[in-house]
Image: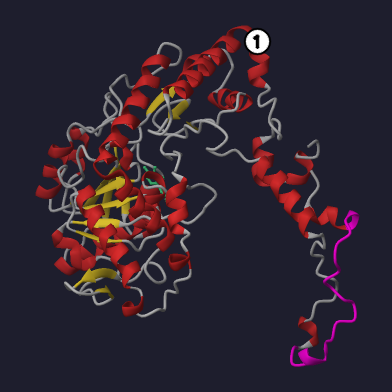
Amino acid sequence: MKTIFEKNNELNGINFFDEDIETKNIDFIDKKYLRKNNIGLPQTNELEVLRHYKKLSDLNFCIEKGFYPLGSCTMKYNPKVNEKLANLENFLNLHPYLKDEDVQGALELMYNLQEALKTITGMDAVSLQPAAGAHGEFSGMMIVKKYFELKGENRKKVIIPDSAHGTNPASANMAGFEIIQVKSNDKGQVDINSLKELLNEDVAAIMMTNPNTLGIFEENVLEISDLMHKNGSLLYYDGANFNAIMGYTNPKLMGFDIVHLNLHKTFATPHGGGGPGAGPIAVVKELENLLPAPIVQFDGENYHRNYNIENSIGSVKSYFGNFGVMIRAYTYILMMGKYLKNVSEHAVLNANYLKEKLKNYYNLPYNEPCMHEFVLSGEKQKETGVSTLNIAKRMMDKGIHPPTIYFPLIVHEAIMIEPTETECKNVLDEFIQIMIKITEEIDKNKEIVLSAPNNTPVKKVDETLAARKPDLKLKTEEI
Ligand SMILES: *Cc1c(COP(=O)(O)O)cnc(C)c1O
């Protein structure tokens, strides 16, 4: 497919760039800074621009096109009604510099969302400011740091399980901590004895995901929180995939002190492509005064943004966070009400259904009841020369977005599947059939799997070359 720049010459557009453009009023700019040549922007008409980008967007895969079981990413369907509400003109046209008294409605929404997230997490205070999951983690780690600074303790280490999401060590490291890895046991859970060996007065915190990235609930979480607190350390909960436990339990009950949520996974904001998200953090009472400012408060009559938080780590983002994402989350929570519990119920049921149906065809390294996701291994298939990567590419031929692969790192040839609560049984059954069909192809017609993807707009690419020297034009020539 041609780029819009190449189309430029073929289309009858409008010339926005008059050669005789007046330059006398820019005399104040030194000549050496003036552009010598035409800027080369496409000069196509509106309809051609529309068609070009529509065709390009048709090449993308999205949840509206098919099943998207990308483990740990919760690529679920987000109701369009929440999108619509976020686009109400009175929300859309607000400016962050408006005075509190002029935006009482918006502040009320933020306040109510803070309250709802307190209930959902069991925590005592919430800041909506962080813009993403990793940003919430980083803010949480800054809170840990400041907490110990204020106590006059010099704790430098953060313990993170070997199954953790990559953002966990990255965030802790950026906040200035040294990372200590704790091993998983043969049940895919934190190995308590290894953890005990790592504990000393240098340890500031542990960062955990529960259920962890294997989709397994950490049964010893209460013992872990007890051990950590006795060691004077804090517990951080990565709540990115909250649809695993919502309404059934919460991080407070498990003994955690800080948690972040991904509003763009669990709470109705579509994600992918780096679009705006939100990673609010919630903390226990003792850490309330360290939260990033502002927090929205209510004095019984009016709502206001409080920037005066005693020991706040400061602001971590401009203004107060991504308001549009908050509207989607808040309206979704109101819409679901007590049925939020069913979200988790269905997410867990769907994952277990797939796991049980697929475990006879692919290795299941941790044969335990799972939560919202589970991890298979393509090791058996690898013996025949077909890798997990080949299997993933073959799924694309069949109209499915591949699951997360080669993560978590502790599973060889990992295939991490998260169906989410929004898929119905037909879709799951179709997926099972496809996964089984691929194993049959590996037995009988391996070539078709090895050459995959065969039916997608972009065929098999040299992965290394594609990453190092992306040449989008060349590879999509045939379209
Ligand atoms: C998605 C995810 C994150 C990171 O969230 P971002 O919004 O992408 O920064 C962190 N932890 C887990 C377990 C996740 O699934």
In the picture as drawn, the residue positioned furthest to the top comes out as 444
Span colored in magenta: 9-29
Q: In this view, does 220 lie above or below 30?
A: above
Report how many numbered discs are placed on residues in the image. Answer: 1
Q: Quadrant of the N terminus?
A: top right
Which secondary structure lies at badge 1?
Answer: loop
| Quarter where residue 4 is shown | bottom right
Decide whether residue 24 is among the magenta residues.
yes
Residue 276, compared with residue 387, is above or below; it is below
**Residue 269 location, x and y as percent?**
43, 49
Decide if residue 110 is on the left or right side of residue 443: left
Kindly indicate the quadrant of the structure image that contains residue 20.
bottom right
Residue 312 placement (x, y as % from top left): 25, 70
Q: Is residue 149 above or below residue 159?
A: below
Give the image location of residue 465, x and y in percent: 69, 40
Name the magenta segment's main secondary structure.
loop
> Which residue is drawn at the image coordinates 19% and 31% (left, top)?
219
Residue 17 shows in the view? yes
Decide whether residue 195 is among the magenta residues. no
Percent position of residue 184, x then y: 29, 31
Q: Mark 1 points at which residue?
A: 445
Point 30% across, 46% down: residue: 238
Picture quarter with the C terminus: top right
Query: Would residue 277 appear left or right of 117 to someone viewing this image?
Result: right
Q: Which amino acid type is marked by label 1?
A: Asn
Residue 106 lies, with reference to residue 237, above or below; the image says: below
Residue 215 seen anywhere in this rendered image of the structure: no
